[in-house]
Image (cartoon, rainbow, N blue to C red):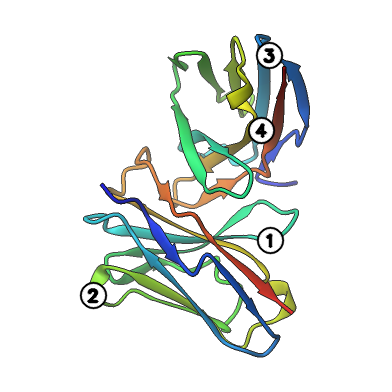
């Protein structure tokens, strides 16, 4: 079974540019999560989709970040315009159920560097 | 105070030794607890869930102490391949998932 995949693995952009990250969850997983790890800090929750609906987007830092999950399959996270503090590793995770004990499977992450 | 706190380490432990680390959480309503393992420049991977009664998986034992609001991870007979960062993860009743910063473990040959 294929795991969670993310694209690209690395992205280097200049401040003010736009970047779109993509996440393909495990097939059949209704829940999709985005997280971010900024250098030296802990992994932080950004948002949670259940199918195509945003269940919780309380972790999104500001309105420069836009996440979509059209059709309830893959998701994109767009940063526009990017700022220096957006640099970090963006992880996507998926899970099958909403039970509290349900395992989240993480993708390999996208390492974003904003210059 | 951070919601989930861990000793960042590093813990430098000789191969074959037993090592244990704790994680404290501040939200008494926290519902589920996990230990994840993260290798350098890789994604976090679930090591084990932590159950109220404590649970064991091979050389790994996890404990939960709700009264004192901490969870622990014990690794017996440590192997070189156990070297990694161990992330404490807590899920609250509102389904918020909170990560600790992680504890770095180095197993020395």
Q: Which mark is residue A71?
A: 2
Q: CA distance from mark 1 to mark 3?
A: 32 Å
Which quadrant holds residue B51?
top left
Which residue carries the number 3 mark?
A: B15
Question: Vertically, is B25 above or below A51?
Answer: above
Judging from the image, what secondary structure is the residue with disc 1 in? Answer: loop
- How packed mark 3 is, by other alpha carbons closer than 10 Å (few <14, some 14-19, many 20 or more), is some
Marks 2/4 same chain: no
Q: Position of residue A55 (x, y in %)?
A: 37, 65
Q: Is residue B66 above or below residue B38?
A: above
Chain letter behind tag 1:
A
Q: In this view, which residue lies farthest toward the front?
A: B109
Secondary structure of residue under mark 2: helix
Q: Considering depth in this image, is A83 or A110 the residue closer to the camera?
A: A110
Q: Is residue B91 visible?
A: no
- Real-space Cα separation, disc 2 to disc 3, in angstroms: 49 Å
Residue B24 is labelled as 4
Which of the two residues, B58 or B65, is positioned nearer the viewer here?
B58
Label 4: element kind: strand
Asked which secondary structure carries label 3, the reply is loop
Task: Tell whether label 1 touches label 4 (CB within 8 Å).
Answer: no
N-terminal-most mark, 4 or 3: 3
User: Disc 1 marks which residue?
Assistant: A38
Q: Residues within 10 Å of mark 1 (few under 14, many from 20)?
A: some
């Amino acid at each position: 079974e294929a795991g969670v995949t993310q694209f690209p693995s690395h992205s280097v952009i200049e401040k003010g540019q736009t970047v779109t990250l993509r996440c393909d969850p495990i097939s059949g997983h209704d829940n999709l999560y985005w997280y971010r790890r900024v250098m030296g800090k802990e992994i932080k929750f950004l948002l949670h989709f259940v199918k195509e609906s945003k269940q919780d987007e309380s972790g999104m830092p500001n309105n420069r970040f836009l996440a979509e999950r059209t059709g309830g399959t893959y998701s994109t996270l767009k940063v526009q315009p990017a700022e220096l503090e957006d640099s970090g590793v963006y992880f996507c995770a998926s899970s099958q159920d909403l039970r509290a004990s349900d395992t989240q499977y993480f993708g390999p992450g996208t390492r974003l560097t904003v210059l | 105070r951070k919601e989930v706190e861990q000793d960042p380490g590093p813990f430098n432990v000789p191969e074959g030794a037993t090592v244990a680390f704790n994680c404290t959480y501040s939200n008494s309503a926290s519902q589920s607890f996990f230990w994840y393992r993260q290798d350098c420049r890789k994604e976090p991977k679930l090591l084990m869930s932590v159950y109220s009664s404590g649970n064991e998986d091979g050389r790994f034992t996890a404990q939960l102490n709700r009264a004192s609001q901490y969870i622990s991870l014990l690794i017996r007979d440590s192997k070189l391949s156990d070297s990694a960062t161990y992330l404490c993860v807590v899920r609250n009743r509102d389904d918020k998932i909170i990560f600790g910063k992680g504890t770095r473990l180095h197993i020395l040959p």
